Image: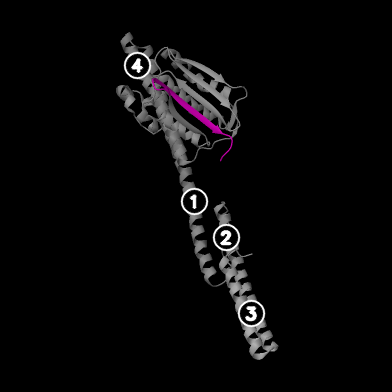
């Protein structure tokens, strides 16, 4: 049934006009004239209803085809609509959808080309960096003085950080290009936290920072285990770097009917209030990092990439990450939320 109230109003007006004419014809010319007037009026109303119904049916068909186009169907055609205003509209929509399909195909081709280019760049950068690391190790073993050995060791440390920076930038670029494919499986949080801690065990031990973990029994969520592990590892790395010797990084996790929640807290100085909205911004340096800027020149891992990458990886899975302070006196807190339902 047509949903346009004007159609029903016009039908009512037509019926009322026909009734009025019938009444006039009856009083002036008798029953036969009134019958003819009623027949003509009824025929006109029926003809109007029929033509309007056909027009609405064509509009409904056009709307259905547009819905299929919006749903990703690319075999949409608006041909065979006949002549008239609807045919002109269908022709214009056909051109629009065709152009959008072409633009989408070009965009996908550009994404594939970008992904291939990033893979080539990654290979071209990692190969010489790996060779340089081997050369530095050989130079350290052949160093004539402990001072020279320490300098070469420092160069090796900065090279490792540079490799991490290159890898992180490439991952961010792939995420921006939309070429990263994320799996969706059941992820065990206890195993996830353990895997995220392992690469940082030596660094945390050298920094005098201890990990404390409490994960609720059976805690899990639907997501990509590998990418989530990297996101969590970047958060843990940030906490270790900003926690003084003798401090602690605590990881806790719980699950309820709404979401799986992972919380990371440290005993460092915390995050300045004005820096909290920008913690996950790319290449952001807050006021609290002023004392670290000279160090960051030789420490690529401190240029504001890790947390930005973590947020990008989590958002791509439909999760959220927020930053706050444990208390006004210090201690950074990061909350990772994997919702079970979408409201």
Q: Quadrant of residue 266?
A: top left
Question: Which sits earlier in the primary sequence, circle 2 or circle 1?
Answer: 2
Indicate which disc, 4 or 3, sits on the residue closer to the N terminus. Answer: 3
Q: Residues within 10 Å of mark 4 (few under 14, many from 20)?
A: some
Q: CA distance from mark 3 to mark 1?
A: 57 Å
Q: Dominant secondary structure of the magenta stretch?
A: strand
Q: Given the current orientation, which residue lies at the most extreme front position? A: 27
| Residue 254 vertical placement versus 35 (above, below) | above
Give the magenta part as a residue range.
326-343
Which residue does the numbered mark 3 point to in the structure image? Answer: 19
Query: In the image, is 328 to the left or to the right of 43?
Result: left
Pointer 4: what residue? Answer: 152
Front position among marks 2 and 1: 2
Q: Toward the viewer: 44 or 94?
A: 44
Q: Nearer the viewer, mark 3 or mark 2?
A: 3
Quadrant containing the C terminus is: top right
Viewer-nearest of discs 4 and 2:
2
Q: Nearer the viewer, mark 3 or mark 1?
A: 3
Whichever of labels 4 and 2 marks the residue nearer the N terminus, that label is 2
């Amino acid at each position: 049934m047509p949903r346009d109230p004007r159609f029903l109003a016009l039908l009512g007006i037509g019926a009322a006009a026909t009734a009025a004419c019938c009444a006039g014809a009856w009083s002036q010319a008798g029953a036969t004239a009134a019958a003819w007037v009623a027949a003509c009026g009824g025929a006109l109303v029926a003809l109007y209803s029929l033509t309007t119904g056909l027009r609405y049916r064509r509009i409904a068909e056009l709307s259905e085809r547009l819905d299929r186009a919006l749903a990703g169907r690319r075999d949409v055609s608006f041909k065979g609509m006949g002549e008239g205003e609807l045919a002109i509209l269908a022709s214009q929509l056909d051109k629009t959808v065709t152009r959008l399909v072409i633009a989408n195909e070009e965009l996908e081709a550009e994404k594939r080309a970008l992904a291939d280019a990033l893979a080539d760049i990654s290979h071209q950068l990692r190969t010489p960096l790996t060779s340089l690391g081997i050369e530095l190790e050989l130079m350290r073993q052949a160093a004539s003085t402990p001072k020279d050995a320490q300098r070469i060791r420092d160069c090796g440390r900065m090279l490792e950080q540079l490799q991490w920076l290159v890898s992180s930038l490439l991952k961010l670029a792939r995420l921006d290009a939309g070429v990263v494919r994320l799996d969706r499986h059941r992820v065990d949080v206890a195993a996830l936290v353990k895997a995220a801690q392992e690469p940082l065990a030596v660094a945390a031990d050298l920094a005098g920072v201890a990990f404390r973990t409490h994960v609720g029994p059976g805690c899990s969520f639907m997501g990509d285990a590998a990418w989530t592990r990297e996101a969590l590892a970047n958060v843990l790395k940030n906490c270790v770097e900003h926690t003084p010797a003798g401090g602690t990084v605590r990881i806790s996790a719980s699950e309820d009917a709404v979401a799986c929640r992972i919380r990371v807290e440290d005993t460092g100085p915390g995050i300045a209030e004005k820096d909290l909205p920008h913690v996950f911004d790319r290449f952001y340096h807050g006021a609290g990092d002023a004392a670290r800027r000279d160090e960051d020149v030789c420490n690529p891992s401190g240029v504001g990439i890790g947390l930005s990458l973590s947020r990008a990886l989590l958002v791509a899975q439909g999760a959220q990450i927020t930053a706050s302070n444990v208390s006004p006196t210090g201690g950074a807190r990061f909350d990772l939320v994997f919702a079970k339902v979408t409201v």
